[in-house]
Image (tube, grey):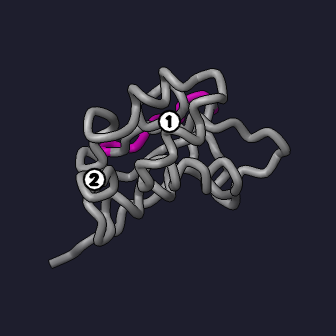
Amino acid sequence: MNTVTPQRIQRHRTKGWRLPAGALYVGRPTRFGNPFPIDDGDPAEAVDRYREWLTDPRTIEVVGGLGFSGYIYYNRGPWGPDLNKLRGHDLACWCPLDRPCHADVLLELANGATTGDEAHR
C-alpha cells in the first residue's frame, strides 16, 4: 500500500499556476484561516496562538478583547472548522514554505493522532 503524507503547498499568483487536485486552500478568508495577525513579522507567534486557539477551550476568553471575538467564537469549537474534512488533503496557504504557517498545525491535527473532534475538547 502506497501512502502519501499530506503536505503544505504555497499558493502563487503566477500565471498558469493552479491548486493541485485534491489540495484545499486554508488561508485567512476560509473557515480554517488563522485570525491572528503577524504583528512583529514573527509568524511563529501567530501560529502558536492559532494552535492554542484550536486545542485549548480556555483561549476564547484570552482572545475576546482583540476586536474580532465574534469571528473567533463562530469559527472555532465543535461548531467551527471540522478538521476531519482536511484529513488526507494537501493544504495550501500563502505563507512561504520555509516559514511557520497555521497550515502545518492543521496538517498535524487533521492527520496526526488527534482527530478534529478531539482538538476541540
Task: Look at the picture and state if 111 lies above or below 10.
Answer: below
Residue drawn at (43%, 37%), measured in percent from left and top? 32
Quarter of the view holding residue 41: top right
Residue 64 in the image, given as x and y percentages of width and height? 57, 31
Q: Which residue is mark 2?
A: 116
Residue 51 in the image, given as x and y percentages of width and height? 51, 54
Amino acid at pointer 2: Gly
Numbered disc in front, either 1 or 2: 2
Q: Is residue 20 magenta?
A: yes
**Which residue is outermost to the left?**
1
Q: Main secondary structure of the magenta part?
A: loop
Q: Which residue is mark 1?
A: 33
Quadrant of the image containing the N terminus:
bottom left
Q: Is residue 55 magenta?
A: no
Quadrant of the image containing the C terminus:
bottom left
**Which element carries disc 1, helix, strand or loop?**
loop
Q: Which residues, given as a range, are shown in magenta?
A: 14-22
Q: Is residue 5 left or right of residue 7?
A: left
Residue 56 in the image, given as x and y percentages of width and height? 44, 54
Residue 70 in the image, given as x and y percentages of width and height? 48, 21
Task: Look at the picture and state if 99 lies above or below 76.
Answer: below
**Which residue is outermost to the right?**
40
Tell me whether circle 1 and circle 2 mark residues in contact (CB < 8 Å): no
**Which element carries disc 2, helix, strand or loop?**
helix
Residue drawn at (48%, 57%), measured in percent from left and top? 105
Residue drawn at (23%, 52%), measured in percent from left and top? 117
Quarter of the view holding residue 67: top right
Task: Look at the picture and state if 107 lies above or below 54.
Answer: below
